[in-house]
Amino acid sequence: MSKEKKIQIAIADDYKIYREGLKKCIANDKSLEVIFEADNGEDLINGFEKKLPDVVIMDLKMPIMDGMEATQIIRKKFPSVKVLVVTMYEDDKFIIHLMEIGANGYLLKNTEPDEIRKSIYAVHENGYYFNDLVNKALLKKLVIKNNFKPSFNQNVEFSEREQEVLKLICEEKTAAEIAKEIFLSPRSVEGIRQRLIEKVGVRNTAGLVMFAIKNGIVT
Protein backbone atom coordinates (compact mmCIF):
# COMPACT_ATOMS: atom_id res chain seq x y z
CA MET A 1 0.00 0.00 0.00
CA SER A 2 1.49 3.37 -1.08
CA LYS A 3 2.03 5.96 1.58
CA GLU A 4 0.07 9.18 1.00
CA LYS A 5 2.31 12.23 0.58
CA LYS A 6 1.80 14.73 3.38
CA ILE A 7 1.41 18.46 2.82
CA GLN A 8 4.72 19.87 4.09
CA ILE A 9 4.51 23.09 6.08
CA ALA A 10 6.96 25.72 7.32
CA ILE A 11 6.02 28.17 10.08
CA ALA A 12 7.50 31.68 10.36
CA ASP A 13 6.62 33.54 13.55
CA ASP A 14 8.81 35.27 16.12
CA TYR A 15 6.71 34.00 19.04
CA LYS A 16 7.74 30.46 19.93
CA ILE A 17 4.59 29.89 21.99
CA TYR A 18 2.45 30.59 18.91
CA ARG A 19 4.58 28.27 16.77
CA GLU A 20 4.11 25.53 19.36
CA GLY A 21 0.34 26.05 19.31
CA LEU A 22 0.26 25.86 15.52
CA LYS A 23 2.31 22.67 15.53
CA LYS A 24 -0.13 21.04 17.96
CA CYS A 25 -3.05 22.11 15.77
CA ILE A 26 -1.38 20.66 12.67
CA ALA A 27 -0.24 17.47 14.41
CA ASN A 28 -3.91 16.45 14.82
CA ASP A 29 -4.08 15.89 11.05
CA LYS A 30 -2.03 12.96 9.74
CA SER A 31 -1.94 14.45 6.22
CA LEU A 32 -0.08 17.58 7.39
CA GLU A 33 3.54 17.81 8.52
CA VAL A 34 5.62 20.73 9.85
CA ILE A 35 9.09 20.30 8.33
CA PHE A 36 10.75 23.36 9.86
CA GLU A 37 10.11 26.66 11.64
CA ALA A 38 11.73 30.09 11.72
CA ASP A 39 11.43 33.22 13.86
CA ASN A 40 11.90 35.68 10.96
CA GLY A 41 11.55 35.88 7.20
CA GLU A 42 15.26 35.66 6.49
CA ASP A 43 15.68 32.39 8.41
CA LEU A 44 12.58 31.04 6.69
CA ILE A 45 13.92 31.68 3.19
CA ASN A 46 17.38 30.37 4.12
CA GLY A 47 15.63 27.19 5.29
CA PHE A 48 14.27 26.66 1.77
CA GLU A 49 17.79 25.64 0.67
CA LYS A 50 17.45 22.44 2.73
CA LYS A 51 13.70 21.77 2.57
CA LEU A 52 11.12 23.39 0.28
CA PRO A 53 7.65 23.37 1.90
CA ASP A 54 4.33 23.18 0.11
CA VAL A 55 2.78 25.83 2.37
CA VAL A 56 4.23 28.56 4.60
CA ILE A 57 2.27 29.89 7.57
CA MET A 58 3.60 33.42 7.85
CA ASP A 59 3.38 36.10 10.51
CA LEU A 60 3.63 39.71 9.30
CA LYS A 61 5.56 41.57 12.00
CA MET A 62 8.91 39.82 12.54
CA PRO A 63 12.47 41.09 13.17
CA ILE A 64 15.20 41.18 10.47
CA MET A 65 12.76 40.45 7.62
CA ASP A 66 9.00 40.89 7.96
CA GLY A 67 6.27 38.79 6.37
CA MET A 68 5.56 41.27 3.56
CA GLU A 69 9.15 41.25 2.30
CA ALA A 70 9.40 37.49 2.72
CA THR A 71 6.16 36.96 0.76
CA GLN A 72 7.49 39.02 -2.15
CA ILE A 73 10.75 37.04 -2.24
CA ILE A 74 8.92 33.71 -2.06
CA ARG A 75 6.59 34.69 -4.88
CA LYS A 76 9.55 35.69 -7.06
CA LYS A 77 12.00 32.88 -6.27
CA PHE A 78 9.80 29.99 -5.10
CA PRO A 79 6.51 30.30 -7.05
CA SER A 80 5.32 26.79 -6.11
CA VAL A 81 5.24 27.63 -2.38
CA LYS A 82 1.85 28.79 -1.07
CA VAL A 83 1.82 31.58 1.53
CA LEU A 84 -0.84 31.64 4.23
CA VAL A 85 -0.60 34.83 6.29
CA VAL A 86 -1.66 34.45 9.94
CA THR A 87 -1.45 37.74 11.84
CA MET A 88 -3.00 40.06 14.43
CA TYR A 89 -3.54 42.83 11.84
CA GLU A 90 -7.21 43.07 10.88
CA ASP A 91 -6.76 45.95 8.48
CA ASP A 92 -8.24 46.08 4.97
CA LYS A 93 -5.15 47.72 3.49
CA PHE A 94 -2.88 45.02 4.94
CA ILE A 95 -5.18 42.30 3.64
CA ILE A 96 -5.47 43.67 0.10
CA HIS A 97 -1.76 44.51 -0.10
CA LEU A 98 -0.71 41.02 0.98
CA MET A 99 -3.10 39.35 -1.45
CA GLU A 100 -1.89 41.57 -4.29
CA ILE A 101 1.81 40.89 -3.67
CA GLY A 102 1.20 37.16 -3.72
CA ALA A 103 -0.23 35.73 -0.48
CA ASN A 104 -2.66 32.85 -1.04
CA GLY A 105 -4.73 33.43 2.08
CA TYR A 106 -5.03 35.73 5.12
CA LEU A 107 -6.11 34.66 8.61
CA LEU A 108 -6.15 36.28 12.04
CA LYS A 109 -4.31 34.71 14.96
CA ASN A 110 -7.57 34.00 16.79
CA THR A 111 -8.71 31.73 13.92
CA GLU A 112 -10.04 28.34 15.08
CA PRO A 113 -7.74 25.32 14.49
CA ASP A 114 -10.28 23.69 12.14
CA GLU A 115 -10.24 26.72 9.85
CA ILE A 116 -6.43 26.85 9.86
CA ARG A 117 -6.30 23.23 8.71
CA LYS A 118 -9.03 23.89 6.12
CA SER A 119 -7.12 26.89 4.76
CA ILE A 120 -3.90 24.84 4.42
CA TYR A 121 -5.72 22.30 2.25
CA ALA A 122 -7.38 25.07 0.21
CA VAL A 123 -4.20 26.99 -0.65
CA HIS A 124 -2.36 23.75 -1.41
CA GLU A 125 -5.08 22.30 -3.66
CA ASN A 126 -6.73 25.40 -5.19
CA GLY A 127 -4.11 28.13 -4.81
CA TYR A 128 -6.21 30.40 -2.59
CA TYR A 129 -8.35 30.61 0.53
CA PHE A 130 -10.79 33.53 0.75
CA ASN A 131 -12.60 33.77 4.09
CA ASP A 132 -15.08 36.47 5.19
CA LEU A 133 -12.18 38.71 6.25
CA VAL A 134 -10.68 38.76 2.73
CA ASN A 135 -14.06 38.96 1.00
CA LYS A 136 -15.12 42.00 3.06
CA ALA A 137 -11.82 43.78 2.43
CA LEU A 138 -12.09 43.07 -1.28
CA LEU A 139 -15.67 44.34 -1.45
CA LYS A 140 -14.69 47.49 0.43
CA LYS A 141 -11.87 48.01 -2.07
CA LEU A 142 -14.37 47.84 -4.91
CA VAL A 143 -16.64 50.42 -3.24
CA ILE A 144 -13.90 52.84 -2.13
CA LYS A 145 -11.51 52.49 -5.06
CA ASN A 146 -9.60 55.70 -4.35
CA ASN A 147 -8.15 54.26 -1.14
CA PHE A 148 -6.14 51.66 -3.01
CA LYS A 149 -3.62 51.78 -5.81
CA PRO A 150 -4.92 49.72 -8.76
CA SER A 151 -2.56 46.99 -9.90
CA PHE A 152 -4.52 44.87 -12.38
CA ASN A 153 -4.41 45.16 -16.17
CA GLN A 154 -7.61 46.65 -17.56
CA ASN A 155 -9.64 45.63 -20.64
CA VAL A 156 -8.27 42.08 -20.76
CA GLU A 157 -9.94 39.90 -23.37
CA PHE A 158 -10.47 36.20 -22.69
CA SER A 159 -11.39 33.33 -24.97
CA GLU A 160 -14.51 31.33 -24.09
CA ARG A 161 -12.29 28.51 -22.80
CA GLU A 162 -10.29 30.91 -20.62
CA GLN A 163 -13.50 32.38 -19.15
CA GLU A 164 -14.77 28.87 -18.47
CA VAL A 165 -11.57 27.90 -16.64
CA LEU A 166 -11.51 31.19 -14.69
CA LYS A 167 -15.08 30.67 -13.44
CA LEU A 168 -14.30 27.10 -12.37
CA ILE A 169 -11.16 28.29 -10.54
CA CYS A 170 -13.39 30.75 -8.66
CA GLU A 171 -15.63 27.82 -7.67
CA GLU A 172 -12.63 26.39 -5.77
CA LYS A 173 -12.16 23.48 -8.17
CA THR A 174 -8.73 21.87 -8.53
CA ALA A 175 -6.98 21.49 -11.90
CA ALA A 176 -7.95 17.81 -11.96
CA GLU A 177 -11.63 18.61 -11.28
CA ILE A 178 -11.67 21.33 -13.95
CA ALA A 179 -10.00 18.99 -16.45
CA LYS A 180 -12.65 16.33 -15.87
CA GLU A 181 -15.50 18.83 -16.23
CA ILE A 182 -14.34 20.43 -19.52
CA PHE A 183 -12.66 17.35 -21.03
CA LEU A 184 -9.05 18.54 -21.00
CA SER A 185 -5.91 17.18 -19.37
CA PRO A 186 -4.87 18.68 -16.00
CA ARG A 187 -1.71 19.88 -17.75
CA SER A 188 -3.77 21.81 -20.32
CA VAL A 189 -5.84 23.37 -17.52
CA GLU A 190 -2.64 24.39 -15.73
CA GLY A 191 -1.41 25.98 -18.98
CA ILE A 192 -4.63 28.00 -19.30
CA ARG A 193 -4.39 29.06 -15.63
CA GLN A 194 -0.81 30.28 -16.19
CA ARG A 195 -1.87 32.14 -19.34
CA LEU A 196 -4.67 33.83 -17.38
CA ILE A 197 -2.20 34.92 -14.68
CA GLU A 198 0.08 36.44 -17.34
CA LYS A 199 -2.79 38.16 -19.19
CA VAL A 200 -4.26 39.71 -16.05
CA GLY A 201 -0.87 40.64 -14.60
CA VAL A 202 -1.34 39.06 -11.17
CA ARG A 203 1.02 36.87 -9.16
CA ASN A 204 -1.02 33.76 -8.46
CA THR A 205 -4.45 32.11 -8.46
CA ALA A 206 -5.64 34.26 -5.55
CA GLY A 207 -4.96 37.34 -7.69
CA LEU A 208 -6.99 35.81 -10.53
CA VAL A 209 -9.98 35.35 -8.25
CA MET A 210 -9.68 38.93 -7.00
CA PHE A 211 -9.61 40.14 -10.63
CA ALA A 212 -12.68 38.04 -11.52
CA ILE A 213 -14.68 39.44 -8.59
CA LYS A 214 -13.55 43.02 -9.22
CA ASN A 215 -14.55 42.87 -12.89
CA GLY A 216 -17.88 41.10 -12.41
CA ILE A 217 -16.77 37.88 -14.13
CA VAL A 218 -18.05 36.06 -11.04
CA THR A 219 -20.24 37.28 -8.20
Image: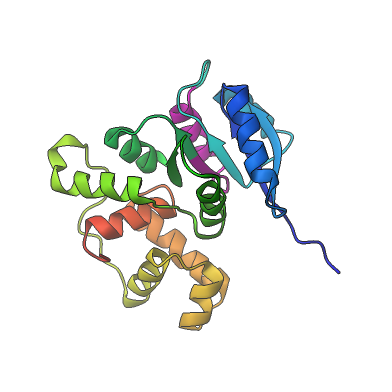
Q: Tell me if residue 20 is in the magenta stretch.
A: no
Q: Nearer the viewer, residue 27 or 40?
A: 27
Q: Residue at x 13, y 38 (%)?
A: 146
Q: How is the image coloured?
A: rainbow
Residue 39 at least partly seen:
no
Q: Is residue 98 left or right of residue 154?
A: right
Query: Count the marks: how many?
Result: 0
Position of residue 106 relative to residue 17, above or below, is below
Q: Residue furthest bottom?
A: 183
Position of residue 87 relative to residue 8, above or below, is above
Q: Is residue 73 left or right of residue 149?
A: right
Q: Tell me if residue 68 is in the magenta stretch.
A: yes
Q: Residue at x 50, y 59 (%)?
A: 126
Q: Residue at x 40, y 56 (%)?
A: 197
Location of residue 25 (image quadrant): top right
Q: Quadrant of the C terminus?
A: bottom left
Q: Nearer the viewer, residue 193 or 174?
A: 174
Q: Is residue 27 left or right of residue 147?
A: right
x, y percent for residue 11: 61, 34
Residue 128 at least partly seen:
yes
x, y percent for residue 201: 34, 50
x, y percent for residue 62: 50, 21
Q: Which residues are magenta?
A: 66-84
Q: Residue furthest top?
A: 64
Q: Quadrant of the N terminus?
A: bottom right
